[in-house]
Amino acid sequence: LLDKCFFISDQGKRYFENKYGILPSYFVSKLGVMKQTNVVLEPLDCRFHIVSCSYLHPGKRVNYIIEALALIDELDLHWTHIGGGDLFEELNAYANAKIGLKRNISFKFTNNYSKQEVLEFYKENYVHLFINTSISEGLPVAIMEAMSYAIPVIATDVGGTSEIVNETCGLLIDKNCSHDDIKRGIMNIYSNYATYPYRKNAFYNWLNNFNAEINYSRFSDQILS
């Protein structure tokens, strides 16, 4: 018999409650990432910079990002994907075929980065928007890391993602979104970027809800009690 059962998301707790009933031993203790001190404040490139960060396997649906970018003609942008995987060569070739000849778009696949290398990338590069098109998630740490650098997020409404992403700091899109839905989401964020405080809201969302220093100390206190 478990004394306490901790979930990393409200969605996970609800799943267990629906399956096994509501129990007083169920608690939510959310993940977090450590405090960042070197947030890039000014863009060094006039192009809109979009980043995705994931292992390249079918469930991450990085091909959806490629298809959406192929539909964009009215915006100069650069897309960086951080992360390798079984589909690295296939998706790199697919991106070259779909968007490689577009004059308004450039892109780069970086292969695998360590966690520290990801954070260094955010320190050294101004990123306007993070995007996640996964078919399923838990509580995505990659989104927390992006928001800790004041980067707003577009993500599919799966798992616990809605507990991180909302209209104040980005945009949730339906799990069964079309490529055009993703394009519209990108253009919507871009159109409002100069006037709406997406970046400030993203940073404070991380600071208030996904700061590891606070969340893990609270979790330790619960265990010790």
Image (cartoon, rainbow, N blue to C red):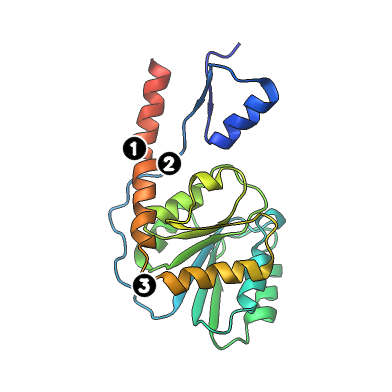
Give how far apart the Cα atoms at labels 3 and 2 are.
28 Å
**Labels 3 and 1 touching (C-beta < 8 A):** no
Q: How far across and how far down the image is residue 100, in percent?
A: 62, 82
Q: How far across and how far down the image is residue 21, in percent?
A: 65, 20
The disc, 3 or 1, on the residue closer to the chain's N-terminal end is 3
* SS of the residue under disc 2: loop
* SS of the residue under disc 3: loop
Q: How far across and how far down the image is residue 34, in percent?
A: 36, 44
Instruction: Read off the residue under disc 2.
Output: 32
Other residues around mark 3 within 10 Å, as few (<14) / some (14–19) / many (≥20): few
Answer left or right for 36 relative to 223. left
In the displayed image of the protein, which residue is found farthest to the top?
1
Residue found 61% across the figure and 43% down from its top: 159
Residue found 45% across the figure and 49% down from its top: 144
* SS of the residue under disc 1: helix
Instruction: Read off the residue under disc 1.
Output: 213
Residue type at tag 1: Glu
The residue nearer to you, when weighing 44 against 204, is 204
The mark closer to the camera, 3 or 1, is: 3
**Labels 1 and 2 touching (C-beta < 8 A):** yes
The disc, 3 or 2, on the residue closer to the chain's N-terminal end is 2
Give how far apart the Cα atoms at labels 3 and 1 are.
31 Å
Instruction: Read off the residue under disc 3.
Output: 194
Other residues around mark 2 within 10 Å, as few (<14) / some (14–19) / many (≥20): many
Answer left or right for 185 relative to 20. left
Residue type at tag 3: Ala
The residue nearer to you, when weighing 168 against 119, is 168
Other residues around mark 1 within 10 Å, as few (<14) / some (14–19) / many (≥20): few
